[in-house]
Image (spheres, helix red, strand yellow):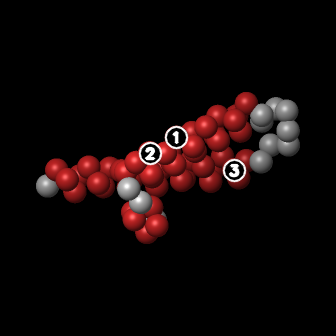
Amino acid sequence: MVELRKKSKADLLLLLKDLYKERFSLRMNAHAETLKTHHFSRIRKMIARIKTCLAEEVNDGAS
């Protein structure tokens, strides 16, 4: 979480976009390959962490 807080907002948004793409490709390839369910949970948690960092930045700027 510390390394995410050090990144800029643009970097976080780019990382978030990449994670959404990765999650989409996992969903599309789920039936074609061996399903690796741990990838879904890892991506979901990373997306939540990034969204939390972005929300903290917004809330810090509002106070």
* Residue 23: quadrant of the picture: top right
Dot 1: element: helix
Tell me if label 1 and label 2 are in contact, CB under 8 Å: yes
Badge 2 density bin: few <14, some 14–19, many ≥20, Cα 10 Å:
some
Q: What residue did someone put label 1 on?
A: 17
Q: Count every numbered label the image shows and give the total.
A: 3
Badge 3 density bin: few <14, some 14–19, many ≥20, Cα 10 Å:
few
Dot 2: element: helix
Question: Which disc is residue 13 wearing?
Answer: 2
Question: Mark 1 or mark 3, which is nearer the start of the sequence?
Answer: 1
For the residue marked with disc 1, what is the amino acid?
A: Lys
In the rendered image of this protein, does residue 44 appear above or below residue 6? above
Where is residue 56 drawn, in percent x and y? 30, 55
| Residue at 44% from the left image edge and 45% from the top image edge | 13
For the residue marked with disc 3, what is the amino acid?
A: His
Question: What is the CA distance from the residue labelled 3 to the residue labelled 2?
Answer: 20 Å
Dot 3: element: helix
For the residue marked with disc 2, what is the amino acid?
A: Leu
Indicate which label's residue lies in the foreground, 3 or 1: 1
Indicate which label's residue lies in the foreground, 3 or 2: 2
Where is residue 63 drawn, in percent x and y? 14, 55
Question: What is the CA distance from the residue labelled 1 to the residue labelled 2?
Answer: 6 Å
Q: Nearer the viewer, residue 36 or 22?
A: 22
Question: Which disc is residue 39 wearing?
Answer: 3
Question: Mark 2 or mark 3, which is nearer the start of the sequence?
Answer: 2
Furthest residue toward bottom: 2
| Residue at 85% from the left image edge and 33% from the top image edge | 32
33 left or right, relative to 53? right
| Residue at 73% from the left image edge and 30% from the top image edge | 28
| Residue at 58% from the left image edge and 44% from the top image edge | 19
